[in-house]
Image (cartoon, rainbow, N blue to C red):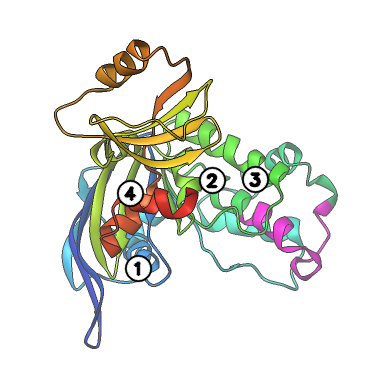
Amino acid sequence: MTTLEVSHLRKYFAAMKAVDDISFTLERGSIFGLLGPNGAGKTTLIRMITGIFYPDEGEILFEGKKFDPILDVGHIGYMPEERGLYKKMKIGDQAVYLAQLKGLSQQQAVEKVKEWFTKFEMQTWWNKKIEDLSKGMGQKLQFVTTVLHEPRLIILDEPFSGLDPVNSNLIKDEIYNLANKGASIIFSTHRMEQVEEICDHIVLMNKGQKILDGTVNGVKQKFKENLFNIGLESDTSAISSEMFDVIARENHRLVVKIRNGFRSNDVLQHFIEKNIDITSFNEILPSLSEIFIKLVEGTPLSRQFQTVHS
């Protein structure tokens, strides 16, 4: 089942194209990474999906029907990058108030807030004020207020900002749990390594345009460059072959790029015939960050690897 379908969205601010012809589909229960550097247009796109901005062109479908900001917003949870909480209000009262704005009764809201506060070990926070919280504590509270009404679409903009590793893992586990229960999640960030770990599908934006769309594994397979990491028992300084180019040497390790017309099995056979003992042999798949650099700057992945590791 499709939760969200975005078709040819455009948004202009004066002469600037903040979002320029973006389309993608979000399936039920998927964790979707919206990637791109600062200024790529991610936040503008999110604001159209949540009804804060109206698109200049294009269409948004929510669960198969034209998106209605008034009717559908109650089924969406949006955690913005900037805190959207009232600094002077008590934390417990604020969480209950926000839950009621999403359609829960007073009793339901109190029960849900207590349930989430217990899960996140926030029971003693009830009478604290937002201004008394650290950035990490504020992030935990914003996450709770985003998801406690059980939205079908959850949008998280830089959710791990300010969190220590323990609380990052806590939020990460809950993201997985929510997806397993059927919620569709958009995870927006410029930290590509986080999306690579969490998401099953990504869209990569730059300067308002979509430059990449696909599953994380599919994208990495598409952009691989026949690079292999080879561990050897012997010194690597004299090793060469017409089958591959050596990209980097480091102690008993080689990084090679296998040339067209040869396979990894051919390289393995070459080392066997030369009586060279191999301790490891694995293909190097590019990271999403490396793929982004390739797409934006035109730098081959092998050149990036050589620059970093040589």
- Earlier-in-chain disc, 1 versus 2: 1
Q: Residue at label 4?
A: 301
Q: Amino acid at mark 1?
A: Ala
- Earlier-in-chain disc, 3 versus 1: 1
Q: Is residue 208 magenta?
A: no
The residue drawn where x is 33% and y is 17% is 268
Q: Amino acid at mark 4?
A: Leu
C-alpha distance separating marks 4 and 3 = 30 Å
Query: What percent of the width, then of the height, locates residue 141?
Result: 67, 54
Instruction: Report if the CB atoms under discs 3 and 1 are less than 8 Å apart.
Output: no
Q: Is residue 136 magenta?
A: yes
Using the image, determine if residue 140 lies above or below residue 44: above
| Nearer-the-camera pick, 129 or 175 | 175
C-alpha distance separating marks 1 and 2 = 30 Å
Specify whether 76 is left or right of 62. right
The residue drawn where x is 32% and y is 65% is 48
Using the image, determine if residue 145 lies above or below residue 226: below
- Earlier-in-chain disc, 3 versus 2: 2
- Judge depth for marks 3 and 2 and give the one in front: 3
C-alpha distance separating marks 2 and 4 = 44 Å
For the N terminus, the image quarter is top left
Specify whether 161 is left or right of 118. left
Q: Residue at label 1?
A: 40
Q: Crowding near pointer 1: few (<14 within 10 Å), some, many (20+)?
A: many
- Judge depth for marks 4 and 3 and give the one in front: 4
